[in-house]
Amino acid sequence: MYLCTLKTKVVEEIIMGEKIKKLKKIRIHREGTNTLLGTFLLVAGVGAALWFCFDNKIPFWSFVVLFGAIWLVVLNFYRCPIRYFNGETEKVVVAPADGRIVVVEEVEEHEYFHDRRLMISIFMSPFNVHANWFPVDGKVLFVKHQNGNYHKAWLPKASEENERSDIMIQTPDGQQVLCRQIAGAMARRIVTYAKDNEDCYIDEHLGFIKLGSRVDVYLPVGSEVCVKMGQATTGDQTMIARLK
């Protein structure tokens, strides 16, 4: 009986230790610090006013439940998990974002490559982590930001007509990969950390897109696709392709 109880306690301690480790790997993205603090102070101020100005506490609790839930959704949006890709990164292409695969097809790319490319697109909903990671190891050749429209991010025309930021990366073996951050109907701000002529690596943050949006990756034709339509992806964890 004693041994059984001891074993149970050990198992519980291991489980608790794993939970603590997971919590330590979650942090808030720097892009959301001011937003979260400002909205928290606003909610706290209005809540305090409702509490002291009304004898009936129904308005206070209604406000707390409604805007507290909204604040938690925003908090979830600005999560920034600490992640590391496990395995060799040579010729590997990882998902640059959390979300769902919405495009896997060969397309004509006329702006930079002027030939056919394999395009893999990931759509991010407002409930996904919106930090972006570099999809490959290499060197950033250039970063270009272009203003545009705000079509719904999952539409095909969003890739070319929406506001976007293009990051061209050359891998160590000379292959070029284009990563495109695309603003959506809700997203109004694209943040790109990548800089011209800097070395970049899988596990590093490429940027951040606020609210629903999309990331396209253009690869050389002949690359091996490792995902399928509708598949959920985890940024910096899911291998979406292997370069030829």
Image (cartoon, grey):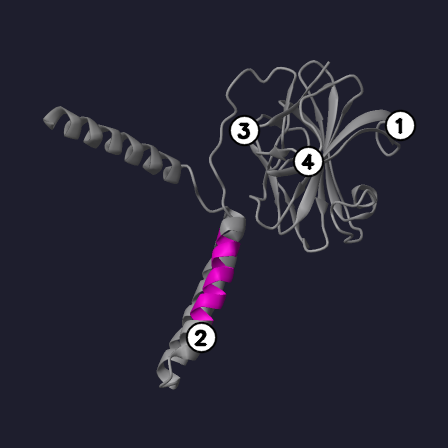
Asked if residue 44 lies left or right of residue 29, the reply is left
Residue 33 in the image: x percent, y percent?
48, 53
Indicate the amino acid at tag 2.
Answer: Val
Point out the tag, 2 or 3, that comes first from the N-terminus: 2
Point out the tag, 2 or 1, that comes first from the N-terminus: 2
Q: Nearer the viewer, residue 140 or 137?
A: 137
Q: Residue 38: in sight, yes or no?
A: no
Q: What residue lies at 89% left-to-right and 27% top-to-bottom?
A: 114
Q: Range of the magenta residues?
A: 63-75
Say which of marks 2 and 3 sits in front: 2
Residue 11 in the image: x percent, y percent?
25, 29
Question: Dots 2 and 3: beta carbons under 8 Å?
Answer: no
Residue 46 numbered tag: 2
Point out the tag, 3 or 4, that comes first from the N-terminus: 3
Q: Secondary structure at mark 2?
A: helix
Q: CA distance from mark 4 to mark 1?
A: 28 Å
Residue position for label 3: 203
Indicate the amino acid at tag 4.
Answer: Gly
